[in-house]
Image (cartoon, grey):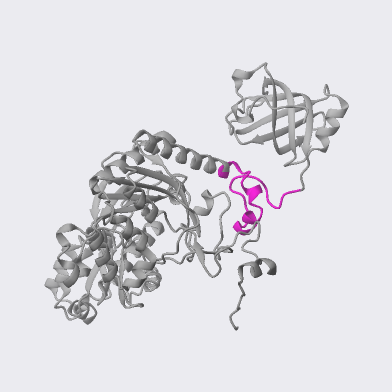
Amino acid sequence: MKLKRTHYCGKLSIENQGQKVIISGFVKKVRNLGHLIFMDIRDISGLIQIAFDKTNSSNILKLAEETRCEFVISAEGIIRKRSSINNTIKNGDIELYIFDFEVLSKADTPPFEIIDNVNAREELRLKYRYLDLRRPELQNIISLRHKVSKAVRNYYDKNGFLEIETPILIKSTPEGARDYLVPSRVNLGKFFALPQSPQLYKQLLMVAGYDRYFQIAHCFRDEDLRADRQPEFTQIDMEMSFVDEDDIMSMNEGLIKYLFKEVMGINISIPLKKLSYKEAMERFGSDKPDTRYGLELIDISDIVKNCAFKVFSDAIKNGGSVRCINVKNSANSITRKEIDKLTEVIKEYHAKGLAFSRYSEDKISSSFEKFLSKDEISLLYKTVNLESNDVVLIVADTNNDIVLGSLGNLRRHLAKMLSLIPENKFDFLWIKDFPLLEYDQNIKRYVSKHHPFTLPKLEHLDKLDKDPMNVTACAYDMVLNGCEIGGGSIRIHDTELQKKIFSILGLPKEVIQERFGFLLDAFKYGVPPHGGMAYGLDRLVMLMAGKESVRDVIAFPKVQNSSELMTNCPSYVDQINLDELHISIKYPKE
């Protein structure tokens, strides 16, 4: 390389006019007009046009004529004003008139065009991810991710936190998602696990007296994927000693305010809104509600509990409820045919059907009105505020979770369908006062709503034995635009209470000792009250970038079956490697 870069393409401007500079980058476009040759050159900072004409030497002109898209080049020249300005790029008023030019690397024709809004299948782009990552949109996102990480480190450092790395090869303590296991060559028959989170280590750091800890931690979960989930992901992890819920929330509200101002120039008002888990579920049918739009759930159980429509009354008599959404000014969009489609949507969430009243063209068509008395109908429509052009959609079930869950998902579906979601709005809130436990019908025992180290509300400790399902946790989630971006809790710091929670979760004493004995042993030597939370960095950046998949904000993501298409991993390994580990593979019969 004889021409060594002096300037980045996107950082040159009219202020550099008349200066001699050297740029390096990829050729985005070539335009050969015979007597003139223009190229757009792209690097990580942006674009600039370079120009050749008949005054260039024959060798340089020949090299320019042979140059194609995605060749890697260096060019020396002088910055001059363009005769025709390109307003689509920030330095479209200048160009680099070439004195010297060299091709550093030739390139085959890529399998897709390296442009934003590229018309290529995601699978193809992921197979050639190194080409996909050349696109300015993705480069901007990766840059955004870097800025977020840098701002996180700056904020926590300013607030007295130490960044401490915790191990990647750890003890398997299976609770929740499946662990990724790593066989040990020198300890035959034993396995490490990859961390699902640094949870136990950060609690042990509190035992060790490190009052404020944080880490941008790589984590792993062997679970089914979706748009906002990957088998390996990154957490912003933090923990504090001698704190309560309000302290953790206040510290992390400060982080969000600092982060959005520093990275995006956006002012986030704090303190953030707070909703209890119960209120969020009853108003929005979700513990991570999107509050940028309305469509709140309305409980009409008391109105229809004695009505002649058995779908409603029987649901309530058997411990369920009847709830609805009034979709205002929607009768033109939600036709009778569309209601049938919406019925199929809620059936995906185990609801049996969708009752409705549709007020259009001065008349109401209803699937249930004839079964109700005039007083019941009048009170129902008054309660839901039915007006002309409204559509009321109703779900009834003996299982209240099905009613809430199906309407919550219907609410999100309707918001997208009717374009009710405002763009470029960041709506944060806290969800708190979660249940401590859930009952898993499959394994017939209690499981933790968050994790088994979550402190119950102290005023609910007397319910642990007789009414554990009504114990509230000192836990909290931060929600942004309908996505949970972070969650945490105050931790149990009393050894006997921790043992009791393990027991309620159905863990035998020997299992408790095997999995968590090291933690309980540490607690014998004094442990401060502590708590913390963790954010999904990938999900947070996804929302900041306005994307719908975390694959768009990870440099080398996995696809649905947890494989990576570019390197074709996971892959088979040589038998010699398996023999060293004394591992044999038994394939399932077809």
Front-most of residues 569 and 160? 160
Magenta stretch encompasses residue 327 = no
Indicate left or right for 28 with 542 as reference: right
Looking at the picture, how far across and down is residue 491, in whole percent? Answer: 28, 55
Indicate left or right for 165 with 336 as reference: right
Give the position of the C terminus as an image quadrant. bottom right
Q: How many marks?
A: 0
> Residue at the right extreme?
58
Q: Which residue is drawn at 51% across and 65% down?
A: 191
Indicate left or right for 222 with 363 as reference: right
Give the position of the N terminus as an image quadrant. top right
Picture quadrant of residue 392? bottom left
Above or below, comparing residue 445 to residue 559 in the picture: below
Looking at the picture, how far across and down is residue 138, in whole percent? Answer: 56, 45
Picture quadrant of residue 570? bottom right
Above or below, comparing residue 1 to residue 140 in the picture: above
Looking at the picture, how far across and down is residue 73, in whole percent? Answer: 74, 34
Q: Residue at x 71, y 38 (%)?
A: 29
Do we see residue 387 in this rendering? no
Q: Start and end of the magenta stretch?
A: 109-138
Front-most of residues 533 and 526? 526
Magenta stretch encompasses residue 137 = yes
> Residue at the top extreme?
18
Q: Residue at x 23, y 48 (%)?
A: 244
Do we see residue 123 in this rendering? yes
Looking at the picture, how far across and down is residue 424, in whole percent? Answer: 40, 43
Picture quadrant of residue 524? bottom left
Front-most of residues 252 and 513? 513
